């Protein structure tokens, strides 16, 4: 059967259109709020390439009008699957910008609902991370860190275990205080900037820490570190941390 989808997000940011453009239309910018490692070949007919957990999609740039409109999409698969992203930027007074993000596409098959829910919940986190990044780390480039924990059988218990490890107590809302010991016995303090049923985002002095429900898989750590670290070492350290937490 399949399902066509169209998800829309909008926010007014204390950043210029040029600053927002750098965040959404360059590899280092996308690395700092989306997921995985990214590369942008600029201009009409260019490409956006991603590397995330062995998944390496490539999207064609369909619209390139800096600093106003940027769009790219995957090629359509034989089963009709595709995904497209579009960003619309509108400058406002005093250097602020309204950014609109549209994610659309088609999910094939009769089991599209689970994938659609994962995509929707994840999309909410990613857009909120873009907003948080431009509010706190505008102009800085992060090292993206991705780590996968053990397979999860009971997600209710998994989230409860993670919340306990992070020093969080219910109810968890934006602004909830986080205090926990990270890899290498590093003390980490921060606040929750986003939470929904499948994701959690934490803002700290030098990082954006994120935890996501993997689609039919494990808990995923998808962090952005604004410090000098070796990415491979950091991913190994966070993978070990997830294993310790979830056993």
Image (cartoon, helix red, strand yellow):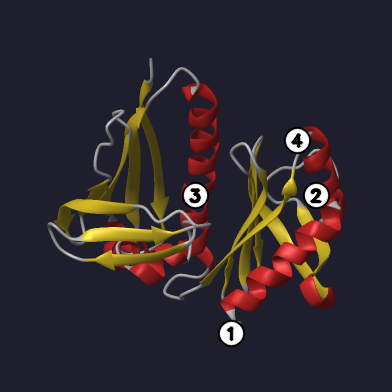
CA–CA distance between discs 4 and 3? 21 Å
Q: Residues within 10 Å of mark 2 (few under 14, many from 20)?
A: some
The residue pinned by badge 1 equals 228
For the point 71% across and 63% down, which residue is it? 239
The residue pinned by badge 3 equals 126
Q: Residues within 10 Å of mark 1 (few under 14, many from 20)?
A: few
CA–CA distance between discs 3 and 1? 23 Å
Q: Position of residue 203 (x, y in %)?
A: 64, 61
Closer to the eye: label 1 or 4: 4
Mark toward the start of the polypeptide (3 vs 1): 3
CA–CA distance between discs 4 and 2? 10 Å
The residue pinned by badge 2 equals 162
Q: Position of residue 38 (x, y in %)?
A: 39, 64
Mark toward the start of the polypeptide (1 vs 4): 4
The image quarter in which residue 223 lies: bottom right
Q: Residue furthest left?
A: 44
């Amino acid at each position: 059967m399949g399902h066509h989808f169209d998800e829309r997000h909008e926010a007014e940011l204390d950043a210029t259109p040029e600053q927002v453009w750098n965040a959404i239309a360059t590899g280092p910018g996308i690395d700092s709020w989306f997921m995985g490692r990214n590369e942008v070949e600029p201009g009409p007919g260019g490409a956006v390439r991603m590397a995330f957990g062995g998944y390496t999609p490539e999207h064609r740039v369909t619209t390139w009008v800096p600093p106003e409109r940027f769009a790219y999409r995957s090629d359509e698969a034989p089963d009709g699957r595709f995904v497209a992203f579009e960003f619309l930027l509108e400058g406002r007074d005093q250097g602020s910008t309204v950014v609109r993000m549209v994610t659309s596409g088609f999910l094939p098959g009769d089991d599209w609902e689970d994938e659609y829910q994962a995509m929707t919940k994840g999309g909410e986190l990613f857009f909120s991370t873009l907003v948080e990044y431009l509010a706190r780390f505008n102009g800085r480039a992060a090292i993206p860190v991705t780590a996968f924990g053990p397979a999860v059988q009971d997600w209710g218990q998994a989230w409860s275990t993670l919340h306990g490890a992070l020093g969080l107590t219910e109810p968890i809302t934006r602004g909830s205080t986080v205090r926990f010991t990270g890899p290498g016995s590093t003390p980490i303090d921060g606040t929750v900037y986003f939470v929904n049923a499948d994701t959690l985002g934490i803002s700290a002095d030098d990082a954006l820490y994120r935890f996501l429900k993997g689609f039919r898989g494990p808990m995923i750590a998808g962090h952005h570190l604004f410090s000098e670290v070796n990415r491979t070492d950091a991913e190994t350290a966070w993978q070990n941390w997830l294993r310790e937490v979830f056993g």
